[in-house]
Image: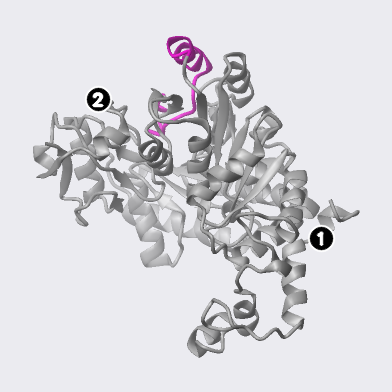
Amino acid sequence: MSYKNTQTHAPIMEALENFRTMRVVPFDVPGHKRGRGNPELTALLGERCMSYDVNSMKPLDNLCHPVSVIKEAEELAADAFGASRAFFMTNGTTSAVQAMILFACGRGDKIILPRNVHRSVINALILCGAIPVYVNPHTHERLGIALGMSVPEVEAAVKANPDAKAIFVNNPTYYGICSDITSIAKIAHDHGMLLIADEAHGTHFYFGEGLPPAAIKAGADIAAVSMHKSGGSLTQSSFLLTGKNVNANRMRQIINLTQTTSGSYLLMASLDVSRKNLALRGKEIYAKVAENADYARHEINRIGDYYAYSDEIVNGDTVFAFDKTKLSVNTLEIGLAGVEVYDILRDEYDIQTEFGDLANFLAYLSAGDRLRDIERLVSALAEIRRIYKRSKLGMLRQEYISPRVVLPPQEAFYSNSVSLPVRETAGKICSEFVMCYPPGIPILAPGEEITPDIIEYIIYSKEKGATLTGTEDPEVSRINVID
């Protein structure tokens, strides 16, 4: 590395600052020419921001083949996260997840994974032609949420599929549930498999204390980290981390299959500065976030009927650990779906939470939250309970339904299909996605059988106001099925 006191520096940010003072005349892209060509956008974002929106060039390095400031910034990130290598990702964590799977698997290769994965995972299987071997997660009886992977069930899947190339794990799930990633890493490596981790919601595991194990530190080979979620960088900026046994040069080649050749310096600078911030102050930042979450849980549970859950649900297996920075709240006892509470908070109280499903909503806490905002949320929830509470009879509670996989995702996605009304699809094989977004976990994925339970779930979700996506039909009234 070039720097002696490494984590105090932000090489990309410093290079952009130096470049700005040079007053270079731009005869390259982007065409707004430091904002002069688009005054309205410059007024919106500011002159300084627009001056940093520049093209790759020698003084600023190149994301596809970094040799100077980007390379130095990636080395600092690897050091901060305790990884062998770190790659700047400007296509979001979706591209990082896809790169992990494309690195691990080719056409016809098996990958062992939980079914409650983000859509980006199954998209990657469509791209590369890999075959999923699902370890269907258990569902928490009261909360209705999908849990982590059971270690004995992972072992059984490995023994039944010794030719699998990798095991994939969520660390954590959207709700804060963690599997025993250390044990799963050992199982993978004992059988010559890679362990790859979706850590879209686990950036803080690398910097906070008293939190579940971070994937790379627990032995994972590759991890996709959404720095923009709990790490403070700009939306769409992420890291891909690799361990010591991963060929980093090959990984760069895989990343470049889908990564843009016009990497945004705004996104890269935000990653660089956010890494510096977490490396220097992450421990105190996340201690405060966890403290705020504990306070919010205590106050919400005092209201009655709501259940803001924490590590009391840990069972040592399917809930091996719980991320206490997550403010996940079950709403069934007040007779409202989580998505209904989510909508009321936004529409009537101007409070935007992260998402709501059939039984829960998630309020995402980070370094930017203030105590008075948490108190406003608590007050709103108390009022919602007083005004809207009703019988919970007839409510669906299950967030996850185990699917029956009939065909590999790639084969199903590219098969001839027809569009049918949702109610007429029972027994058919889906050729597209149906999901609530967020969180983006498919209710149906290509290659899965559509059952009456799934049809009921889709219709009920629409009635409750969930945002359904993934189908060609924008109204999600019809589903494409294999002809």
Q: CA distance from mark 2 to mark 1?
A: 52 Å
The amino acid marked with disc number 1 is His
Q: How many marks?
A: 2
Q: Is residue 284 above or below residue 481?
A: below
Q: Going by the image, does 377 lie left or right of 282? A: left
The amino acid marked with disc number 2 is Val
Q: Residue at (60%, 74%) from the top-left corner?
A: 53
Q: Is residue 391 above or below residue 89?
A: above
Secondary-structure class at tag 1: loop
Give the image location of residue 193, x and y in percent: 56, 21
Instruction: Tell me the residue that label 1 is attached to.
Output: 9
Q: Residue at (66%, 40%) from the top-left corner?
A: 205
Question: Which segment did they paint magenta?
Answer: 138-162
Q: Going by the image, does 193 lie left or right of 110? A: right
Identify the image quadrant of residue 393: top left
Residue 282 versus residue 386: which sits nearer the camera?
282
Label disc, if present, on residue 406 of the rendered structure:
2
Give the image location of residue 113, x and y in percent: 45, 27
Residue 170 versus residue 430: which sits nearer the camera?
430
